[in-house]
Image: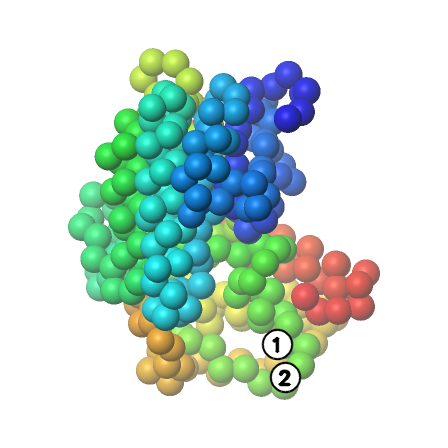
Amino acid sequence: MTGSGLPALLLTGGSGQVGCALREAPPEGFEVVAPPRAELDLADPASVRRWVGARPWAAIINAGAWTAVDAAESHAAEAWAANALGPAALARASGEAGIPLVHLSTDYVFDGGLDRPYREDDPVGPTSVYGASKAAGELAVTALNPRHVILRTAWVFSPWGANFVRTMLRLGQARDALSVVADQHGCPTSAQDIAAGVGAVCARLSGDGAPSGVFHFAGAGETTWFGLASRVFERAAAAGRRSPALTPIASADWPTPVRRPANSRLDTTAFTRTFGRAPRPWTETADEVTDRLLASAEGEGDAA
């Protein structure tokens, strides 16, 4: 407990990408409390109830999840515990206490087969354990806490944790050439921008007429993994850093246990209309994160 005097937000998943962003830059006018997993474990309903009842939270932000997409196929029980059962326990406890819940979800609830950006009312059709567990988590949140906002996002990157931008910079320092998938389309999204979007949601959660339901929040514009890698290495080259030769390849040339959605694009019109904040262009946020990682690497003598 802290004594800032500000309304408090309970954050799960504080060590993840969005959790780190929220702890670094809390929503304006709020204090963020992020218990470690040893104290608040989504797989432990008793710890969930204990923390939800610990104080009169202004809202609860669930940024905790099992995000290892391929590993979820062989660890289904763990993925479902984190992505479905945990959110259910959190939604039940917060719903009974009348506390708003902001729950982060993913484009993987869709099968990727549309030829346009997905809207909130498009039917879900997950094709993986990860996607199915996240879809089940959405259903639980919707059913158990009427004061909920579900934010679906996609292609998250940041200065923290395991993500595509960090991986590219690391590999680029070790290899002269890289092959990158060029037939999957999406909207790269920085964790810092998601945190700002969460802040816009939190600012609207009190009082009558607070918005609820499912909303999409992802970086403005679209590209492929090859396009994102190209942007990262253009930025790195401009900073005088090593830039490998990139070769575009098809998904079939880079097989993985889980088939990635060919289309991960999300339509964010409803979020912007409802909360008054538009996601920033992915090019802008990718440049910011790349610059920060390059600066950090210079100071630490490591690439990423």
Q: Is residue 121 above or below residue 26?
A: below
Q: Is residue 296 above or below residue 38?
A: below
In contact (CB < 8 Å): disc 1 and disc 2: yes
Q: Report the residue at 43% width, 56% height from top.
A: 66
Q: Examine the rendered structure and indicate whether residue 46 appears above or below residue 158.
A: above
Quarter of the image with the C terminus in it:
bottom right
In the image, is 38 to the left or to the right of 293?
Answer: left
User: Could you tell me which secondary element the residue under label 2 belongs to?
Assistant: loop
x and y, in percent, of residue 2 in the image: 67, 24
Where, by quadrant of the figure, is residue 236 drawn?
A: bottom right
Tag 2: amino acid: Arg
On the rendered structure, is 138 left or right of 284?
A: left
Q: Nearer the viewer, residue 62 or 303?
A: 62
Q: Residues within 10 Å of mark 1 (few under 14, many from 20)?
A: some
The disc label shown at residue 175, or none: 2
Q: Position of residue 75 (x, y in %)?
A: 38, 66
Farthest-out residue, top:
208
In which quadrant is the N terminus drawn? top right
The location of residue 88, given as percent across then percent down, is: 33, 40
**Residue 278, visible in the rendered structure:** no
Q: List x then y, in percent, for residue 63.
A: 47, 44
Of all residues, the one furthest to the front in this rendering is: 46
Q: Residue at x 61, y 19 (%)?
A: 6
| Picture residue at 52% right of the left edge, 45% below the top | 13
Q: Which residue is mark 1?
A: 171
Count neighbours of disc 2 (C-alpha within 10 A) and say few if under 14, some if 14 to 19, many if 20 or more: few
Between 65 and 19, the one lying in front of the other is 65
Q: Label 1's element?
A: helix
| Front residue (pair 171, 2) | 2
